[in-house]
Amino acid sequence: MRVVIAMMEHETNTFSPVPTPLARFARGRDTPPEGPEVLAAYRRTGSGIGGMIDTAEKWGAEIVAPIAANAWPSGPVEDEAYRYITDRIAEAVDKGCDAVLLDLHGAMVTRALDDGEGALLARLRRIAPGIPIGVSLDMHTNLYPEMVENATVIAGYQTYPHIDQHRTGVRAAEAIFRMLDGKANPVMVWGNRPMLPHVMRQGSEFGPNKLLQDRCIAMEEEGALAASLFVGFPHADISLAGLSSVIVTDGDRARAEAWRDELLDQAWKSREAFVYRIEPLEQSLARAKQVSEGPVILLDHYDNAASGGTMDTMTVLKGILDAGLENVAAFAIHDPDAVAEMMRAGIGAEVTLPLGGKIDMPSIGMKGEPLVVSGRVRLISDGRYRNIGPASVGVLMDMGPSVVLDTGKVEIVVISRHQEPNDLGCLLSLGIDPRQRRFVMLKSRVHWRAGFAPIMKDVIECAGTGVCTSDYSMLKFRKVRRPIYPLDLINDPAP
Ligand SMILES: [Zn+2]
C-alpha cells in the first residue's frame, strides 16, 4: 500500500504587504524539505503531517513524501511558489498510489486563485479520479465547495490555540486507512453561514467556540468519522471567508446533514458573542501601570505573525516605553536590518537605532514608522529552538539571526524571520525567563495562550496598529459576499 503524504500550509491575509515567495515556505533554505527530509523533519512531531506519517507507519504503508511546505501567514502566495509546491505533489500522485493524505491550511489565496487548496485537490482528482484523499485543515479554513467536492475525508482542528494538529492528521488518516481496509464508507457534507467571527473571540478554551468544538468532539464519540467547525479567517477579502462546517459519517448522509445543521445553527445563534469590543490603548496601558504582580501579558493583537502581520509596528512598544513600565520582555520586532546592525556592533555594545516600521501597509493607509531606541546588545543567537509544547511539540522553529536589545527597562527581542510567540521556547532560547518578568509584551492574538497562559497572572489586550487590526472597519472588503455579519447587522442567515 503506497500513500502520498504532503503538506502545503499558508493562511493568506489579503491585506498583508508581507510577500509570499517560495523562500517563505523554506524557512532559511532555497526550497522546502522534500522526500526523506520530510519524514526526518516531521515524524513523531506535533504536526498534522506528523500525525499522518505516524498513522501510515502504523498501518504499514509505504510513504512517498514529495514536499512539506509551511509558511507563516502573509500576503497572497506568488504563483511561482504555488506552482512549485503543487507540481511536486501532483507528480508524486501521477506516479501511482493507493491514497493521498494532505496537511493543508484551507485559507490559501494566490495571486491567481482565491482557493488554492480547492484547485490543488481538483487537479489531483483529475489525475487519479477514484483515489481516496484525506485532508487535515486549520480551524481558520475559509471553505470552498471545490475542497469538499474533491476530497474524500476532511478533518479540521478542534482547538485554538492549535494544539491538536497531530490528532487532526491522525483523524483524517485513520478514516482513509479504514476505508482502504473496507471498514468505512465516508460520506461528507458541508455548509456555511454568512458570518465573520472575530479572531479575538475565536479561542476554544472558553466562549462560543468552546461549546461548538466540544460538540464536534462529542459527535465523533457518537460515531462521526470527523466533525469540524471552521471559524474562518476574516482578514481575507474573498467571497467565502467566514464560518463553515464539514461532517464526515460512515455512510449516513442524513445524520451528517443533521449534525452539520446543528453546528451551523448554534454558531449563528452565537454570532453576537463572536463580536469583539476594543479598548483604547491609553486605557489599557493605564491599567497596566496599576499592576503589582506579574507576569502580565501585554497583547499587541493588531500585528501578529500567525495572522499575516508585518510584526514590526511599534505603537504598543512605544506606549510601553513612554509609560515607563519596568521589567518587561517584548516579543518580538521583525527587523533583519536592525539585527544585522546590532550583530556588527557586537555583544555588550551600546546602540541607538531606528527599530521596526520598515514595511508600509497600503491596505490600511499607513506607512511604516520606525522608533528610535537606545540600549545594550545583550545576546545574539541563531534563533533556532524546538517547540516545548503543547503546540507543535518537537517542531524546529527558526527566527533567523536574533538579538536581545536591553533598554534597561525593556528587553526587546529583534528577529529576522517571522515567529508567532506560541511557545515558551521563543524566549527561553534567548535566555529570557518570562516567569521572572512583570510584563511580557507579545505580538499575538490567541496562539500565545498555548505556551504562556499557564504562567501568566493576567492579560491586557493592547490595540496597536497593523494589518491584523481588530478594528474591521479599517479593512476595505470588496470581494467577501454580502450581507455578512457583523459587517452587516443581519439577523437572518439566508436573507
Ligand atoms: Zn489557525
Image: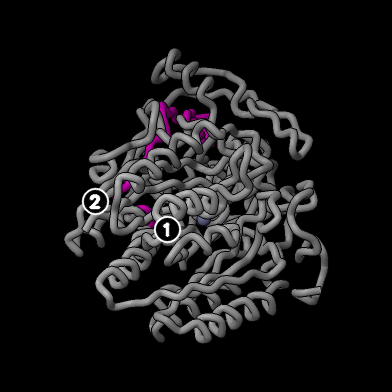
Task: Report the residue marked by disc 1.
Answer: 129
The magenta span reads 391-417
388 relative to 163, above or below: above
Label 2 amino acid?
Ile
Question: The residue under label 1 is which amino acid type?
Answer: Pro
Residue 365 image offset from top left, x and y in percent: 78, 35
Nearer the observer, 81 or 290: 81
Secondary structure category for the residue under label 2: strand
Packing grade of label 1 (10 A; few <14, some 14-19, many >=20) is few
Residue at 39% in and 60% down: 133
Report the side of 347 relative to 465 (left or right).
left
User: Which residue matches tag 2?
Assistant: 63
Task: Say which residue appears at 65% left-offset and 39% top-offset.
Answer: 16
Q: Nearer the viewer, residue 22 or 119?
A: 119
On-image quarter of the N terminus: bottom left
Q: Earlier in the sequence, mark 1 or mark 2?
A: 2
